[in-house]
Image (tube, helix red, strand yellow):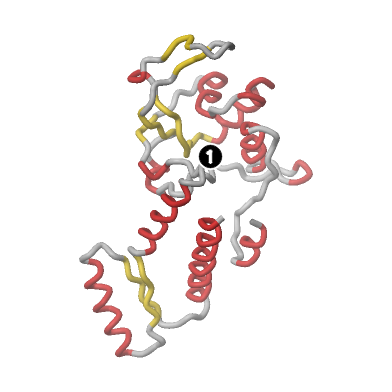
């Protein structure tokens, strides 16, 4: 992560050590947004969005719509006894699966972590529940997108690969090299492809920010190839 940040001169990026549990890791990140090294204060953000890296395909527009993502349950949830027998089952229509991302007013989620118990830190998994229980803040939920599933098992990598390929197939970049004739041709191609909902960027050369952008694409493509072949 630090290599990527330094290579592409990213700004406003903090890399924070995780904790021993999910909630401890999240609190480390939330706290780092307002507390700098040595206890120095940072300008805290108004909003913080918490997301899982194992859900790599979240769309930016979705972050503006609600505090939390949910999905209908596709299987019945049951509780078992210590001996492995059925105890009871839940009525599936009343429940939803909670997903990420989740967005909060910064002060709400910070105070929720300040007030929660050690048991919450050790065994809790739901940030929305902490905001409700310790700050009395109920949140707006909307049904998540199909692409918000988690890359959990080896078989999920094939599905992730297909999404990456489909995304790349919908965009292209044309480098004209400063030639007027090439620019005219590229612009015509751009107009034609837009009718097919394909995005075509036209740039004249590979200097400055354009070179950095192309390097980012090359790095991302390389990363995806390595990630999907693991």
Residue drawn 49% across the image and 44% down it: 151
The residue wearing badge 1 is: 50
Determine whether, in the image, residue 87 is placed left or right of residue 171.
right
**Label total for image:** 1
> Which quadrant: the C terminus?
bottom right
Residue drawn 56% across the image and 42% down it: 45
Determine whether, in the image, residue 213 is placed left or right of residue 167.
right
Find residue 133 and report its horizontal and vertical position in percent.
Answer: 54, 19
Q: Quadrant of residue 192?
A: bottom left
Residue drawn 32% across the image and 87% down it: 182
**SS state under label 1:** strand
Residue drawn 42% across the image and 13% down it: 89
> Which quadrant: the N terminus?
bottom right
Determine whether, in the image, residue 60 is placed left or right of residue 134.
left
In the rendered image, the vertical position of residue 175 relative to residue 26, given as above or below: below
Q: Quadrant of residue 8?
A: bottom right
The one nearer the camera, 228 or 11, is: 228
In the rendered image, the vertical position of residue 13 relative to residue 72, given as above or below: below
In the rendered image, the vertical position of residue 192 relative to residue 59, given as above or below: below
Find residue 120 and report its horizontal and vertical position in percent.
Answer: 63, 22
Find residue 99 and report its horizontal and vertical position in percent.
Answer: 45, 34
């Amino acid at each position: 992560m630090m290599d990527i940040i330094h290579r592409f001169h990213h700004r406003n990026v903090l890399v924070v050590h995780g904790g021993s549990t999910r909630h401890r890791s999240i609190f480390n990140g939330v706290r780092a947004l307002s507390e700098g090294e040595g206890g120095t204060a940072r300008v805290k953000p108004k909003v913080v969005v918490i997301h899982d890296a194992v859900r790599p395909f979240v769309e930016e527009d979705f972050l503006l719509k609600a505090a939390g993502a949910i999905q209908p349950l596709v299987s019945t949830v049951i509780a078992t006894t210590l001996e492995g027998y059925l105890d009871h089952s839940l009525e599936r229509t009343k429940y939803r699966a909670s997903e990420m991302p989740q967005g909060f007013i910064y002060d709400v989620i910070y105070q929720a972590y300040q007030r929660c118990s050690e048991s919450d830190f050790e065994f809790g998994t739901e940030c929305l529940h902490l905001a409700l229980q310790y700050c009395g803040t109920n949140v707006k939920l909307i049904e998540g997108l199909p692409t918000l599933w988690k890359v959990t098992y080896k078989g999920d990598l094939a599905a992730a690969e297909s999404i990456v390929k489909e995304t790349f197939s919908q965009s292209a970049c044309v480098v004209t090299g400063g030639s007027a004739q090439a620019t005219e041709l590229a612009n015509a191609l751009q107009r034609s492809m837009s009718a097919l909902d394909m995005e075509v960027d036209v740039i004249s050369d590979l200097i400055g920010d354009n070179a950095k952008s192309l390097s980012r694409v090359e790095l991302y493509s390389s990363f995806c190839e390595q990630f999907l072949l693991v």
